[in-house]
Image: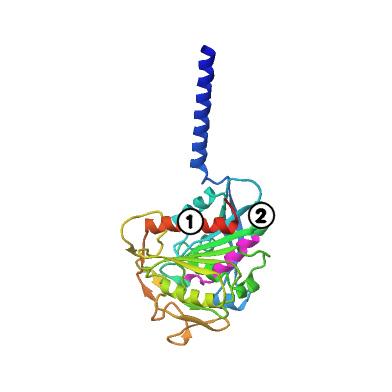
Amino acid sequence: MLRRGFTVGCAFWLIGTMSALAADADTTKDIAARTELQAITTLTLSDQHFLTGEVDGKPTTLTGEFRIAQGSGRLPVVVLMHGSGGMGPNIEMWSKEFNAMRVSAFAIDGFTGRGLSAVSTNQALLGRLNFILDIYRALDVLAQHPRVDPARIALMGFSRGGQAALYASLKRFHRMWNKSGVEFAAYIPFYPDCMTTFIDDTDVADRPIRIFGGTVDDYNPIARCKEFMTRLRAAGHDVEITEYPNASHAFDTPLGGGPPIVAKGGQTVRHCTIREETQGRLIDVATKEPFTYKDACVEFDPHVGPDPEAREAAKQSVKNFLRTTFKIE
């Protein structure tokens, strides 16, 4: 009788222990198995030089935070590119979401190596196209890494980084600057700036593009992205926009609450129309002169803030899209 009781007790102990271990594994699945700080050798150059392919910039070394997910072998990766405010809390949130899927995350810090912390109130501090070059140079690192599946690398960016994530899809830019031998499996821009029309900008990589934004975003209006989407679709490309009716700019931030707040002094080109008239020459269409952040169309004080409902919906949409794209369970 004592032996039977002992056996039953052991069985319950084993079941309890296994349940506790399973619960513990579930709560730690978003923790990276390994984190590396990778050097990214790039350039700091003007938009004109980027557009003309001139390698005439300042040599710059940036850092990429590589959070390698739990799992073995070569894993899929999402490259994350921050916005004008730098490496915000949404970068960490998304990295953990991807790690929990056994997808690694590579977050590029495009500012610290350049002596910057933010450019929100002075966008002229850094050419907007620098981030695209930084993204391609990050591919140089990932293409050689033994824990990366080079066929399963997606690009995700936010605001200024969202603009970079969107236009990094242009084949013209790949030809000029991407020397890694690797292409992204997908492009996921969040609330990007779509106010610029580049030469041959409908000739993009044959990969899906998924844009996310809010209807009430007065920083980077989603209506302008819809115009670009229409042109891309007419050219036969796989592009979709997911729009959240109550979401403002930076709606996916996990911090803060309440209604959107004014980003005091923040510059927005929401009412600008910028066009690459000839290669390397970006003009303000209203004035026909080269665009600068002193142009009359540049405005200030847009709104930013979280929308928890939109954030959670976007998480699910992005993760479902990546499961399909990366062919993971």
- Residue 128 lies within the magenta run: yes
Q: Which mark is residue 145?
A: 2
Mark 1 vs mark 2, CA separation in Å: 22 Å
Indicate the position of residue 250 as horizontal and vertical percent values.
41, 62
Q: Which mark is residue 63?
A: none
Decide which of 231, 172 is in the foreground and name it: 231
Magenta region, main secondary structure: helix
For label 2, the SS is loop
Is residue 213 in the magenta section? no
Q: Amino acid at mark 2?
A: His
Q: Which mark is residue 91?
A: 1
| Classed neighbour count for the residue bearing mark 2: other residues with Cα under 10 Å, few (<14), some (14–19), many (≥20) | few
Classify residue 136 as left or right of residue 247.
right
Q: Which residues are magenta?
A: 125-140
Residue 98 x/y as whole percent: 53, 52
Residue 243 visible? The answer is: yes
Q: Label 1 sits on what residue type?
A: Ile
Residue 80, above or below 54: above
* Mark 1, other Cα within 10 Å: few <14 / some 14–19 / many ≥20: many
User: Quick one: 53 or 231, which is closer to the camera?
Assistant: 231
Question: Total of numbered circles in the picture?
Answer: 2
Q: Does residue 107 appear in the picture of this structure?
A: no
Say whether residue 108 is left or right of residue 118: right
